Image: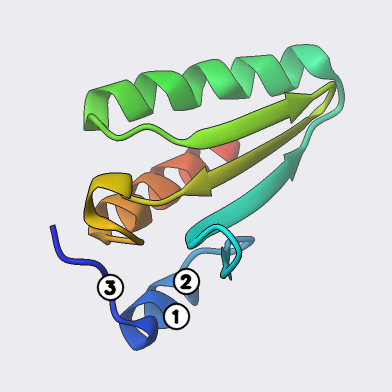
């Protein structure tokens, strides 16, 4: 799958509240904050199921009630439409 041009990526990011492009890791990223660990973990479980269904998996970390997600299509060397689609699904899961 072709990587998005910077213009295509920025246009897509404008439709994804909370997401930004991180040049250091060549990925789109978003941080999520929850009331407690249980809610953060439940969110991660929902994201894991959606990612598995899409066949596209995030780089992420969790610290108590915070979850950081980075999306990049490593096999294609950057951000692709797969990342945008998964970010949209993640936003919907976050509510």
Numbered label attached to residue 10: 1
Direction from residue 72 to residue 41 in the image, left or right: right
Q: Please provide percent x and percent y for residue 26.
A: 48, 62
Name the residue rendered at 81%, 16% in the picture.
37
Crowding at dot 1, Cα within 10 Å, few <14 / some 14-19 / many 20+, comes out as some
Q: CA distance from mark 1 to mark 3?
A: 9 Å
**What residue appears at the point 54 percent right and 47 percent down from the top-left corner?**
70
Q: Are marks 1 and 3 in contact (CB under 8 Å)?
A: no
- Image position, residue 76 (x, y; %): 23, 55
Residue with the mark numbered 2: 13
Dividing the picture into quadrants, the one containing residue 81 is bottom left
Residue for badge 3: 4
For disc 3, the neighbor class at 10 Å (few under 14, some 14 to 19, many from 20) is some
Q: Nearer the viewer, residue 11 or 80?
A: 80
Q: CA distance from mark 1 to mark 2?
A: 5 Å
Say if 18 sits above or below 37 in the image. below
Q: Quadrant of the N terminus?
A: bottom left
Q: In this picture, is 82 found above or below 55? A: below
Number of the label disc, if any, that sits on residue 36: none
Q: Nearer the viewer, residue 69 or 53?
A: 69
Whether tag 1 and tag 2 are in contact, CB under 8 A, the answer is yes
């Amino acid at each position: 799958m072709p990587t998005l041009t910077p213009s295509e990526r920025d246009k897509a990011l404008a439709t994804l509240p909370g997401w930004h492009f991180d040049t250091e890791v060549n990925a789109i990223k978003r941080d999520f904050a929850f009331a407690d660990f249980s809610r953060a973990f439940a969110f991660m479980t929902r994201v894991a199921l959606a990612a598995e269904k899409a066949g596209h998996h995030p780089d992420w970390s969790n610290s108590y009630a915070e979850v950081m997600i980075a999306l990049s299509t490593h096999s294609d060397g950057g951000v692709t439409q797969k990342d945008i689609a998964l970010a949209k699904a993640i936003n919907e899961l976050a509510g």
